[in-house]
């Protein structure tokens, strides 16, 4: 396979990434000098070693964040806005280098990595604009005897925890509003993909984030490092993106200090195709909703329900579209589907597909692991998937589209809502009355109506049920990092 980049270019991009902990404005080694290996999922080989923070390092990071909070919280909104704006521009200036690092550590094709850098940068631009629009209120009490002042103030030091699937954008979606609101922070990226966050940290530092405001710690022992910080009492907010299972554990820990939380958790998105839908548009939407990020997205369509009159045609067209994807190393020319993140992810996809087949599903395309190095799985479409199949109830997090049929609208909505999750749903129909009826009934925080990708920094992203608490992005995104204070005073 001929590569877009030769190995020397790849090595140089990785070599340029800082590998220390970033605490109080200084890069430093972990206490005791430990390191953790970062692997390339397309080869299974070690790419780089980064500092492996201990609990002591975590406390040092929180010390720095707590010490910096008073001055940062009182800083001028325009100063915070300008820092974010400079970082936005720097991300775009360095888009190609950053995309290469991201592809190497996470596996997604370069075009998608470039797309994520642009998406990540947009959060910084959006929140640079929000920083100067934090407002309050002034009112007279109903009986005319008092005045009310309402002010919004930074929550205080924040703990931010991000997953590996969008290593840069899940960071800026939290760091952007935290900086805009005047909060200091300790951020911990996933151990599989720390390099993108380390690059982002360097960029934010160069953009003028003062010492102590942003502290980045990488570690192989997330629980041991983060739990003491959650229970410490000085951090006032936890913003977490990751699995529902870990989210539940963290919520329990946060109850000890009644810390405010934002939880962006797992999904099990239904994708409904009605008989009146534009089928080609539905296939295009399905491809985006399923294959963006190789299916490793919380928003990935996980369950396809297609009206029985169009199900065969839909399955055939989706198999043609998905089946023609080119699997390989994300850095190579023409590749549109990279590897899964690790062996455990590959094992899970293999197990889910085998289980569905054993219970009666038919493989329309794909259905196999790709032989050789790395964690590659073929783009796959399954039809006739019974409700008893495990993948109906589990986040697949891989390039597998399981299709079932329905006969009535009520049946489709009931099936869509039959899950503990509620992040996003997709609906394809050309009937406006049905579209609105179904959107109202779906139990999810977001709906893609004739649209396969809903994520947008200017829109409120988030879920209901076991998919989480709170929203990121949009006008409400900054509210998650602000407290409301009400001042009552007499009216003479
Ligand atoms: P994960 O295993 O829950 O890990 C997420 C983050 O939590 C990582 O940084 C991880 O660190 C850390 N973590 C794990 N255990 C912890 C603990 N006991 N205490 C503190 N931190 C801990 O999830 P993932 O596999 O990285 O990501 C995939 C999941 O994220 C999927 O369920 C996906 O749906 C969800 N997700 C949701 C959204 C959304 O916006 N709703 C967006 C993207 C992804 P280590 O990596 O070091 O273990």
Image (cartoon, grey):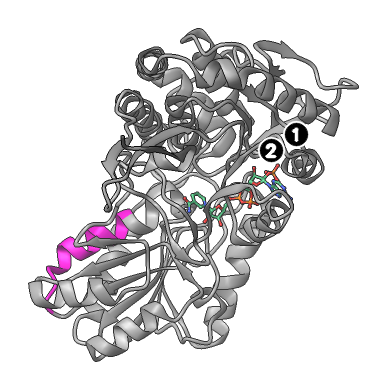
Q: Nearer the viewer, residue 134 or 373?
A: 134
Kindly check if marks 1 and 2 are in contact, taking CB atoms under 8 A apart as contact.
yes
Bin the neighbour count of mark 2 within 10 Å (Cα to Cα): few under 14, some 14-19, many 20 and up: many
Residue 166 in view: yes
User: In percent of the image, x 32 and y 32: which residue is there?
Assistant: 135
SS for dot 1: loop
- Note whether ligand 1 is within 8 Å of mark 2: yes
Could you tell me residue 163's position as x and y percent? 58, 44
Question: In terms of image quadrants, where is residue 104?
Answer: top right
Residue 172 tag number: none
Where disc 2 sits, the SS reads loop
Does residue 106 appear left or right of residue 67 in this picture?
Answer: left
Q: Position of residue 417 (x, y in %)?
A: 39, 78
Tell me which corner region of the image, top left, top right, bottom left or bottom right, holds residue 435: bottom left
Residue at mark 2 = 191
Q: Give above or below for 308 relative to 36.
A: below
Task: Out of 267 and 40, give the one closest to the viewer.
Answer: 267
Q: Is mark 1 within 8 Å of ligand 1?
A: yes
Look at mark 1 in the image and give the residue it sits on.
219
- Earlier in the chain: of badge 1 and badge 2, it is 2
x, y (%) of residue 227? 77, 45
Principal SS element in the magenta part?
Answer: helix
Residue span colored magenta: 276-288
């Amino acid at each position: 396979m001929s590569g877009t980049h030769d190995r020397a270019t790849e090595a140089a991009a990785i070599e340029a990434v800082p590998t220390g902990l970033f605490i109080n404005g200084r890069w430093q080694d972990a206490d005791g000098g430990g390191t953790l290996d970062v692997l390339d999922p397309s080869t299974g080989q070690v790419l780089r070693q980064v500092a492996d923070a201990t609990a002591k390092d975590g406390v040092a990071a929180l010390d720095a964040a707590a010490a910096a909070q008073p001055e940062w919280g009182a800083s001028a909104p325009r100063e915070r806005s300008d820092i974010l704006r400079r970082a936005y521009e720097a991300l775009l200036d360095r888009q190609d280098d950053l995309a290469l690092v991201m592809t190497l550590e996470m596996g997604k094709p370069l075009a998608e990595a470039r797309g994520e850098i642009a998406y990540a940068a947009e959060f910084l631009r959006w929140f640079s604009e929000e920083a100067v629009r934090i407002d309050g209120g002034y009112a007279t009490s109903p009986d005319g005897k008092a005045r009310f002042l309402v002010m919004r103030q930074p929550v205080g030091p924040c703990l931010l925890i991000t997953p590996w699937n969008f290593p840069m954008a899940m960071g800026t979606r939290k760091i952007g509003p935290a900086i805009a609101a005047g909060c200091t922070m300790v951020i911990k990226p996933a151990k599989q993909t720390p390099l993108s966050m380390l690059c982002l940290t360097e960029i934010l530092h160069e953009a003028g984030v003062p010492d102590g405001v942003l502290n980045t710690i990488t570690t192989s022992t997330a629980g041991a490092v983060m739990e003491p910080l959650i229970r410490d009492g000085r951090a006032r907010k936890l913003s977490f993106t990751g699995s529902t299972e870990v989210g539940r554990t963290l919520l329990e820990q946060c109850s000890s200090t009644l810390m405010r939380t934002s939880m962006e958790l797992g999904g099990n998105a239904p994708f409904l195709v009605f008989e009146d839908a534009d089928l080609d548009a539905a296939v295009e939407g399905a491809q985006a909703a399923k294959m963006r990020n190789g299916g490793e997205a919380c928003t990935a369509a996980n369950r396809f329900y297609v009206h029985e009159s169009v199900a065969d045609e839909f399955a055939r067209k989706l198999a043609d579209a998905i089946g023609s994807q080119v699997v390989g190393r994300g850095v190579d020319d023409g590749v549109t589907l990279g590897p899964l993140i690790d062996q455990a992810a590959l094992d899970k996809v293999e197990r889910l597909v085998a289980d569905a087949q054993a219970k009666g599903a038919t493989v329309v395309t794909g259905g196999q692991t790709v032989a050789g190095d790395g964690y590659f799985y073929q783009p796959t479409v399954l039809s006739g998937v019974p409700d008893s199949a495990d993948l109906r109830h589990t986040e697949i997090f891989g390039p597998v589209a399981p299709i079932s049929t329905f006969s009535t609208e009520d049946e489709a909505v009931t099936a869509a809502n039959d899950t503990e999750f509620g992040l996003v749903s997709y609906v394809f129909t050309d009937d406006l009355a049905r579209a609105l009826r179904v959107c109202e009934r779906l139990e999810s925080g977001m709906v893609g109506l004739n649209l396969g990708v809903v994520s947008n920094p200017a829109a409120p992203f988030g879920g209901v049920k076991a998919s989480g608490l709170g929203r990121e992005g949009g006008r409400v995104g900054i509210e998650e990092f602000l407290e409301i204070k009400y001042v009552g005073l007499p009216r003479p």
